[in-house]
């Protein structure tokens, strides 16, 4: 699995946890399992550890950026979501949309 995909998955989980739990970001980051290794892989290789750390760092940047632009992102979603109020959307869908809008509007590295 590629770094961006893994980072996006982590970021969605973090955004969901932050929204539903109301925890401060630092707490969300520290409670998130950095490794993300399957339980049977007790001793991941150094390369795998490095990739997991890079994915975690990228996920953290995505979460911080998404939440930093949340008001503008939510307004954009509200304007374009026909027959849907943002508050009525399932939390996971809402956070997937937020992350996607953030990447498309604020990340120059995303084509």
Image (tube, rainbow, N blue to C red):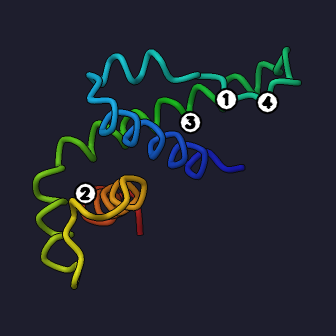
- The extreme front residue here reads 88
Q: Earlier in the sequence, mark 2 or mark 1?
A: 1
Residue 24 marker:
none
Q: Earlier in the sequence, mark 3 or mark 1?
A: 1
Left or right: residue 50 compared with residue 26? right
Q: Where residue 102 appears, x then y in whole percent?
A: 29, 57
At label 4, counting other C-alpha atoms closer than 10 Å, the crowd grade (few under 14, some 14-19, many 20 or more) is few
Query: How far is the residue under mark 3 from the one under mark 2?
Result: 19 Å
Report the front residue among 12 and 109. Answer: 12
Picture residue at 41% right of the left edge, 69% below the top? 111
Residue position marked by numbered label 4 in the rendering: 38
Say above or below: 84 vs 49. Answer: below
Question: What SS does tag 4 mark?
Answer: loop
Q: Where residue 79 appears, x then y in whole percent?
A: 13, 77
Question: What SS does tag 3 mark?
Answer: helix
Residue 55 marker:
3
Residue position marked by numbered label 2 in the rendering: 106
Left or right: residue 106 compared with residue 57? left
> To which quarter of the image does residue 104 belong?
bottom left
Question: What SS does tag 2 mark?
Answer: helix
Picture residue at 54% right of the left edge, 47% below the top? 9
Q: Is the C-beta separation of discs 3 and 1 under 8 Å?
A: yes
Q: Earlier in the sequence, mark 4 or mark 2?
A: 4
Report the front residue among 39 and 108. Answer: 39
Residue position marked by numbered label 1 in the rendering: 36
Q: Nearer the viewer, mark 4 or mark 3?
A: 4
Query: How far is the residue under mark 2 from the one under mark 1?
Result: 27 Å
Query: How far is the residue under mark 1 from the one under mark 4?
Result: 7 Å
Q: Is the C-beta separation of discs 4 and 2 under 8 Å?
A: no
Q: Earlier in the sequence, mark 4 or mark 3?
A: 4
Picture residue at 26% right of the left edge, 64% below the top? 88
Left or right: residue 2 compared with residue 80? right
């Amino acid at each position: 699995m590629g770094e961006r995909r893994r980072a996006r998955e982590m970021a969605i989980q973090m955004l969901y946890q932050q929204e539903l739990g109301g925890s401060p970001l630092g707490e969300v980051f520290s409670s998130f399992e950095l490794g993300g290794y399957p339980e049977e892989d007790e001793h991941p290789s150094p390369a795998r550890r490095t990739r997991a750390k890079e994915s975690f760092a990228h996920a953290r940047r995505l979460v911080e950026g998404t939440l930093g632009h949340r008001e503008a992102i939510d307004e954009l979603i509200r304007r374009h979501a026909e027959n849907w109020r943002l508050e009525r959307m399932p939390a996971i869908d809402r956070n997937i949309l937020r992350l996607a809008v953030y990447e498309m509007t604020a990340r120059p590295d995303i084509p």
